[in-house]
Image (cartoon, rainbow, N blue to C red):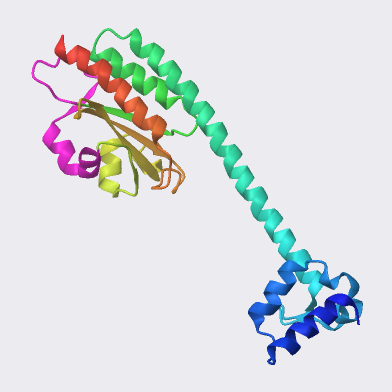
Amino acid sequence: MNTEANTAEQIDSDSGNELSADQVVEYLKNHPDFFSNQDELLADITLPHESGKAISLLERQVTILRDRGIEARRKLNNLLENARNNDQLFDTTRNLVLALLRANNVTEISDVTQDQLANHTSIDACEVIVVRQNGLNVSDSVRTETHDFLQQEFGDVFRLKRTHCGAINADKVNYLFPSTGANVKSTALCPVIHNGEVLALLAFGNQEENYFNVNLDTLFLDFIGHVVGAVLQKQFSA
């Protein structure tokens, strides 16, 4: 019997009892090459398979390694996809900021915000709803709504003061996206904020059911909300 086998036998003899599963696991972890010289043992070891057919230890190891490789590739693909999305969103944000610097009134701010964000590949629908202010002068193309109505309908956005992603009912989807609501399956609602006050609401829609979800990183969207809010506040104060 080889040295590794003698060591295992010695452990059993010293303990005076049968080896526990934990002891076996610990031993094999410390001796990962144990089976390299145990051809006869490997030939006798079988493992149950989901199909009911017994498989060898080597086959099981190959299966586990293959599954781990598939999972690793999936995670890598997700990381690459997120990186591409972030790059595109950064470009969209940069172009939006530059366009906002050239805007001269609330109408232009609303128009350029909607135009720039609607061009992003992940945004299938985009709406800008400005909170009505005393003396607000905008064109008919700009959507406006009272603060109380928006707060009542979209309370989470006003309470948290950050982008809210998740399921909303069909009536709210149709309100936010009157021309494309039937195609929108997931939404992101971004408050346009300045000094803690919500000045407008940005609504984003996607045709994929779970694209905008509670786990989505909303850093760029929240930043956009603050940038648009700073520009809007200057017009409201003028």
Q: Is residue 54 visible?
A: no
* Residue sticking out furthest to the left: 134
Write the residue at 20% across / 43% down. 155
- The number of numbered discs placed on residues in the rendered structure image is 0
Specify whether residue 147 is painted magenta. yes
* Residue sticking out furthest to the front: 14
Residue 135: image quadrant is top left
Q: Position of residue 220 (x, y in %)?
A: 41, 30
| Nearer the observer, 179 or 157 | 157
Write the residue at 72% across / 87% down. 14
Q: Quadrant of the C terminus?
A: top left
Compared with residue 187, is residue 126 higher up or lower down, i.e. above or below?
A: above
Residue 118 located left or right of residue 74: left
Specify whether residue 214 is painted magenta. no
Q: Position of residue 119 (x, y in %)?
A: 46, 24
| Nearer the observer, 123 or 82 | 82
Region of the chain picked out in magenta, as a range: 131-160
Compared with residue 91, is residue 17 higher up or lower down, i.e. above or below?
A: below
Compared with residue 59, is residue 179 higher up or lower down, i.e. above or below?
A: above
Q: Position of residue 202 (x, y in %)?
A: 30, 30
| Nearer the observer, 13 or 161 | 13
Q: Quadrant of the N terminus?
A: bottom right
Residue 217: image quadrant is top left
Q: Is residue 205 visible?
A: yes
| Nearer the observer, 35 or 122 | 35
Residue 222 located left or right of residue 161: right
Write the residue at 68% across / 58% down. 68
Write the residue at 67% across / 78% down. 23
Q: Position of residue 95 (x, y in %)?
A: 44, 16
